[in-house]
Image (cartoon, rainbow, N blue to C red):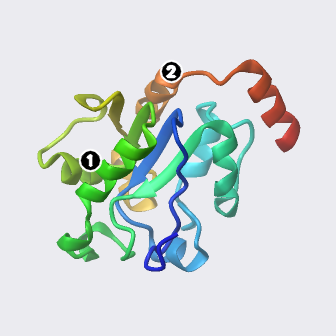
Amino acid sequence: MPCDHLVPDLLAPNLRLVFCGTAPSKVSAREKAYYAKPGNQFWPTLYRIGLTPRLFSPQEYPELLKLGIGLTDLCKTHSGNDDELPEAALDRDALSRKIECYRPTFIAFTSKHGASIYFGKKVEYGLQKEKLGSTQFFVLCSTSGRARRFWREEVWQELATLIPILDVRTVDAAKELYL
């Protein structure tokens, strides 16, 4: 992990899915764990929509690699609410380089704001027309408690239907590890 990253990337070649946030919350930066702020619905949502075999805690985020899922942020050097982030810290080019290097099947932005920054235009929820290489993009509504009024779990469920299913032996092995 570069020494200036507040929360380390969780990336590997050819993952099924990489979630991309805008920036870690101050709690996530302090805990060095993704989506760690109390009230954030990221981890319960992953479980409810079937992307994880059980409810994970934020500190267990490295275990997602076993499920073909990764994590990153547009801003790796600052934390806080979107309106507190310096524009220069939102690094679209770094994300593009990560996508080209690791070639995930999907990048799912965990907010419209982050996706709009990356694409340089207003976006809607759901599958996007743009691709980078073979990587497809999906825009989700934020799981942050501050964005609760925009919450639509069906958008997350739609994403889950698009994610390639892991080999059955891998899923069974994952369940044995976690149950």
Q: Residue at x 39, y 69 (%)?
A: 76
Disc 2 residue type? Thr
Mark drawn on residue 115:
1
Q: Give coordinates of residue 23: x percent, y percent.
A: 38, 65
Disc 1 residue type? Ala
Visible residue check, residue 128: yes
Element marked by disc 1: helix
- Residue 118 horizontal side relative to residue 64, left or right: left
With respect to residue 18, does 28 lie above or below?
below
Q: Earlier in the sequence, mark 1 or mark 2?
A: 1
Mark drawn on residue 161:
2
- Residue 23 horizontal side relative to residue 35, left or right: left
Q: Residues within 10 Å of mark 2 (few under 14, many from 20)?
A: few
Q: Residue at x 33, y 59 (%)?
A: 74
Which corner quadrant holds the C terminus? Answer: top right
Residue, far left:
121
